[in-house]
Image (spheres, rainbow, N blue to C red):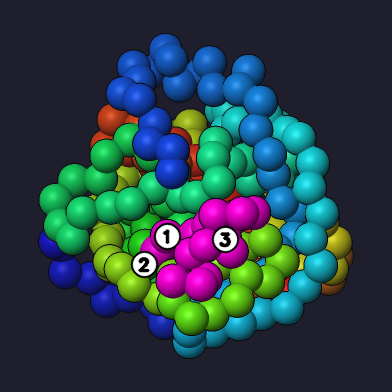
Amino acid sequence: MRRRAFAAIAITTIVLAGCSSDERRSLASMPVTTPAAVTTSSSSTTTSTSTTTSTTAAPTTTQPSGLYEPVPGPSLTGDRTDEFAADGPLDNGQYWVTYNGTDSTDAPFVSLYIAYFGEACVEAAAAFNDECFGDLFVTPTPTRDIDDVLISDDALITVADARSTSNYRITFDELRVASTGVPSPVAPDGYTYQPFAFLMTVIDGEIVAFEQFRTS
């Protein structure tokens, strides 16, 4: 793993089949269920909020390209995010991660967890003698830190607005800036980056979507 001086940031399955670069673009037609606001609950951290559910498209690289353009919220392909090995490359899949900052221009430093939703949330929480709140439970273990998965040039990168259900599309460069607490002047008035978790979609060894979940 490449050595980096990481910026300190405050933080908390359906496995995708192998896809070619052309097949990535077909994800937009996949019907999925998206929680617009969720509650994180684990044996170590709990955050309370209300939950709403809507249907939206899967990650796509055809969203508006301008900084802070409103876009749909995170897209899920199942009732849990994918499991991951303790080391080695990540398989194609969707992963629940916290963003820890980075000094790289092409790869984030993240911590991976497994998140469960709906009925799967109830079962997972019970296994840890905990409760499912807001249809989301994030297990305290396993976890893994990783910093060598590159961001695709046309990846869908979004941040959530704590004041609403809005997500905004940005670039990885803007994420690096906004996460320090000082977003670009083009950010919506009053917007402040919050260390919410992200849904990270990996295809063929690259991050093709990095979508932030609003929790409050």
* Crowd band around label 3 with a 10 angstrom C-alpha radius: few (<14), some (14–19), many (20+): many
Marker disc for residue 95:
none
Note whether residue 121 is visible.
Answer: yes
Q: Is residue 195 above or below residue 85?
A: below
Marker disc for residue 111:
2
The amino acid sitting under disc 1 is Ile
Q: Which residue is tagged 3?
A: 121
The amino acid sitting under disc 2 is Ser
Which quadrant is home to the C terminus? bottom right
Dot 2: element: strand
- Gap between marks 1 and 3 measured at Cα: 11 Å
In depth, the one of 177 and 121 nearer the eye is 121
Q: Is residue 166 left or right of residue 127?
A: right
* Crowd band around label 1 with a 10 angstrom C-alpha radius: few (<14), some (14–19), many (20+): many
The amino acid sitting under disc 3 is Cys
Camera-side mark, 1 or 2: 1
Magenta-drawn segment? 113-127
Point 34% across, 72% down: residue: 141
- Gap between marks 2 and 3 measured at Cα: 20 Å
Marker disc for residue 114:
1
Point 50% across, 50% down: residue: 80
